[in-house]
Amino acid sequence: MSKAATRQLTHLWDASRCVNCGACQVACTMTNYVYLAYAGKDIKHGLATNIRRIFDESTSSTKLLLMQCQQCVDAPCAKRCPEKIIKRGSDGLMVTDEDKCIECGRCTKACPYGARWDLPVSGAPQSCMGPGCRALVAAGQKPACVQACPALAREFGDINDPKSDVRKRANAPGMRRGGMDKGTKPRFIVLEKA
């Protein structure tokens, strides 16, 4: 892994605000993979998006979770990559050097959250954040899913910055951290009502 990150850019999803409209998934597709959407390629999960709808069956009642790359501290995808090309960038996000990828699929299979997927033609592994969203963030904007959410259920920013909106929301009274931890120490924040 690269040297310690100076920032920790973090996605937050507030399940209590989500209206399950799918705007985040459409925005992800249209920002990162529009060529697949219009080409009618067979995408395993429906839209060509880094955001997956899954059902958390670890609780007594099944609930919908919108999952994406968890930016794990102990990332199985990085461990399983034979080329060691999945690393944490200076912004704290996991980055795959696609130019060096041999498309073996090990990283995709290793993700316990189902957050990695392969492009249907090339087989290159994908995960949040896609190239379009990385460009938005580099330009000082928020990722497409955050911008598109009509319910304001999403936030993004530097969790290490006490003044950031993502940090304030993560520590808001009346909320608790939810989601799933499958032993990877995920950094994707899921909020639920306490």
Image: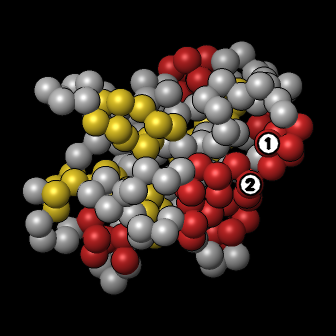
Relative to 36, 47 lies left or right? left
* Residue type for callout 2: Met
Q: Position of residue 125 (x, y in %)?
A: 69, 31
Q: Position of residue 193 (x, y in %)?
A: 16, 57
In this view, 37 is above or below 193 = above
Viewer-nearest residue: 116 or 149: 149
Residue, x 71% and y 28% (percent of image)?
43
* Residue type for callout 1: Ala
Q: Are marks 2 and 1 in contact (CB under 8 Å)?
A: yes
Q: Position of residue 137 (x, y in %)?
A: 63, 69
Which residue is identified by label 2? 30
Q: Say few, some or many: other residues with alpha carbon within 10 Å of mark 1 (under 14 / 14 to 19 / 20 or more).
A: some
Residue, x 18% and y 30% (percent of image)?
61
Q: Residue furthest bottom?
A: 163
Q: Using the rendered view, name the quadrant where residue 107 is placed.
A: top right
Q: Is residue 82 visible?
A: no
Whole-number angstrom distance, CA of label 2 to CA of label 1: 8 Å
Q: Using the rendered view, name the quadrant where residue 153 is placed.
A: bottom left
Q: Which mark is residue 37?
A: 1
